[in-house]
Image (cartoon, helix red, strand yellow):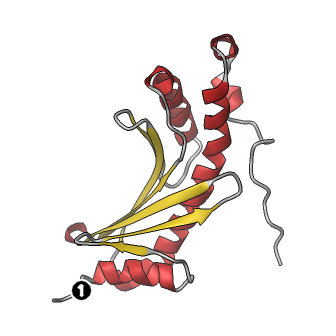
Amino acid sequence: MTTDPYLTALEQSFSRRQWAARRVPDQLVYQATFEAHHTRVLVHAQAFPEINAITVVGYATNDIPASRCGLVAEMLMRLNHQLTLGNFELDYDTGRAVFRATNVFPSPEAAPPIVSALIHAAIAEIDRLTPLLTLILRMSTEELSRLNLKLFILREDLLPPVPEAP
């Protein structure tokens, strides 16, 4: 059986960084869990060889009840305006927020360093999102009625610390 070159590129993306990942049987998918500042992030990386693309998805761990989905969806859309790469999405059926980034490659050999960068972006964005989600899910109805989402998403006190350059 021939291995798909984009699946090989996914494997290389994880192995070059020495990230522990597991292949999902019968799919062109690798998954890994990463420890971030605020949370653990499940990353799902999938190859789409028919279009020369790889998608990386980071999953937030917060369960979002139906009663907060509208507010969370608005917050995610406002956060999307700040992004250059990828986007936030809300799966209303599962109550789960995700960050998704896809790239189309000229060849599978070009993929590993870019996929590694997409994985870093997914981890960072879910880590940035987690405290915002946590606070919104804990707020009372009265607090929510006074919430200015535009200002709320600009809170820098919730950002993970930026490591100093070596």
60 with respect to 164 (left or right): left
152 with respect to 163 (left or right): left
Instruction: Give the residue displayed 70% in from the left and 29% down from the top.
Output: 152
- Pick the residue in front: 10 or 62: 62
Neighbourhood count class around disc 1 (C-alpha, 10 Å): few under 14, some 14–19, many 20 upward: few
In percent of width and height, residue 105 lies at 35, 73
Work out whether 92 lies above or below 127: above
Which residue is disc 1 drawn over?
3
Work out whether 128 lies above or below 138: below
In percent of width and height, residue 132 lies at 65, 37
Q: Is residue 78 something one can see in this rendering?
A: yes
The C terminus lies in which quarter of the figure?
A: bottom right
62 with respect to 115 (left or right): right
2 with respect to 161 (left or right): left
The N terminus lies in which quarter of the figure?
A: bottom left
Work out whether 53 lies above or below 153: below
The secondary structure type at the circle numbered 1 is: loop
Work out whether 122 lies above or below 132: below
- Pick the residue in front: 64 or 7: 64
Instruction: Give the residue displayed 28% in from the left and 84% down from the top.
Output: 5
Instruction: Give the residue displayed 52% in from the left and 73% down from the top.
Output: 116
Q: Residue furthest bottom?
A: 1
Q: Quadrant of residue 106?
A: bottom left
Q: Quadrant of residue 93?
A: top left
- Pick the residue in front: 13 or 150: 13
Instruction: Give the residue displayed 48% in from the left and 30% down from the top.
Output: 73
In percent of width and height, residue 40 lies at 60, 57
Q: Is residue 107 something one can see in this rendering?
A: no
In percent of width and height, residue 16 lies at 52, 86
Q: Residue furthest left?
A: 1
Q: Amino acid at mark 1?
A: Thr
